[in-house]
Image (spheres, rainbow, N blue to C red):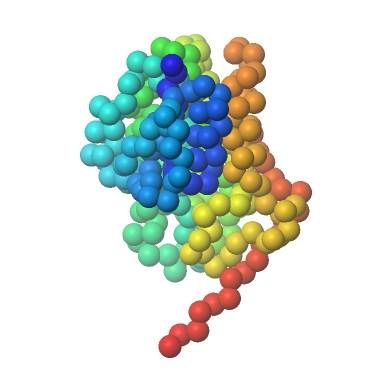
Amino acid sequence: MKNAIVTGASSGIGLACAYKLVNMGYKVIGVSRDFSKCNCDHHNFVHVACDLTKKEQLVALQHKIDKQNTYILINAAGVGHFGPHETLRIDQIEEIITLNLTAPLLLTKLFLKPLKENSGYIFNISSISAQQPAIFGAAYGASKAGLQHFGHSLFKEARKSGLKVINIAPDITNTAFFDGLDFKPTEDPQSFIEPEDIADIVAHTLNLRPNTVVTNITLEPQKFKLEKRPRKKSQ
């Protein structure tokens, strides 16, 4: 059975991709810090606890996974902190860069050999913020732009092996990503993307003729609308 490694697999885009791949017959190794709120108990969905911001845990991860049958890697884990750049804390900037950019680069390096040998797939979940100025999200946009550039460069480097590298850049998506932020999607279903939409894109890409590679996909909702959360009054 072919293995698919999915980061951020306990919720949102990662979980939707994990469900989709399990139903397609893959064994999914879901990687996340915490699976306590994840109810998926399918026998082909293996939960591996790992803090992707910790280099030693990333390195240890390669010893917990059957590398020989690794066919897919989906870098879906991510975090965002937003506001004027001078208002972000140093630890917030470090978390953005470490989780959104450093972790995918290291994880890809650790599993690149079997992915190339198996003519496999790497999906990087980027963001529309990687493609246009991200006002009040300069650090976040930079991390996603770096991830997208890495994907393009890696494909050029490794394409002769049969490796496919696909960047998926969604706009506002209806996930827990916005929990704790001061803005969120509106209730208008035309103003956001669902995680399952992105999982469908992954499935469609896997069903393309093997020698055809879609290297960059952008998803936008029909309407652009955001809702500000009310600020909490200070006591």
Whole-percent x, y for residue 220 in the image: 69, 45
Whole-percent x, y for residue 118 in the image: 44, 13
Whole-percent x, y for residue 147 in the image: 48, 38
Query: Can you name the residue that lies furthest to the bottom here?
Result: 235
Question: Foreground residue, 103 or 187?
Answer: 187
Question: Foreground residue, 90 or 14?
Answer: 14
Quarter of the image with the N terminus in it? top left
Question: Foreground residue, 87 or 111?
Answer: 111
Instruction: Find residue 13 and report its image quarter.
Output: top right
Residue at horizontal 48%, vertical 55%?
Answer: 80
The answer to whether residue 93 is visible is yes
The vertical placement of 130 against 205, above or below, is below
Instruction: Find residue 89 and report its image quarter.
Output: bottom left
Whole-percent x, y for residue 27 in the image: 44, 25
Quarter of the image with the C terminus in it? bottom left
Q: Tell whether 122 sits left or right of 170.
A: left
Q: Tell whether 29 sits left or right of 16.
A: left
The vertical placement of 5 against 76, above or below, is above
Q: Tell whether 147 sits left or right of 189.
A: left
Q: Tell whether 159 sits left or right of 192.
A: left
The answer to whether residue 104 is visible is no
Residue at horizontal 55%, vertical 39%?
Answer: 16
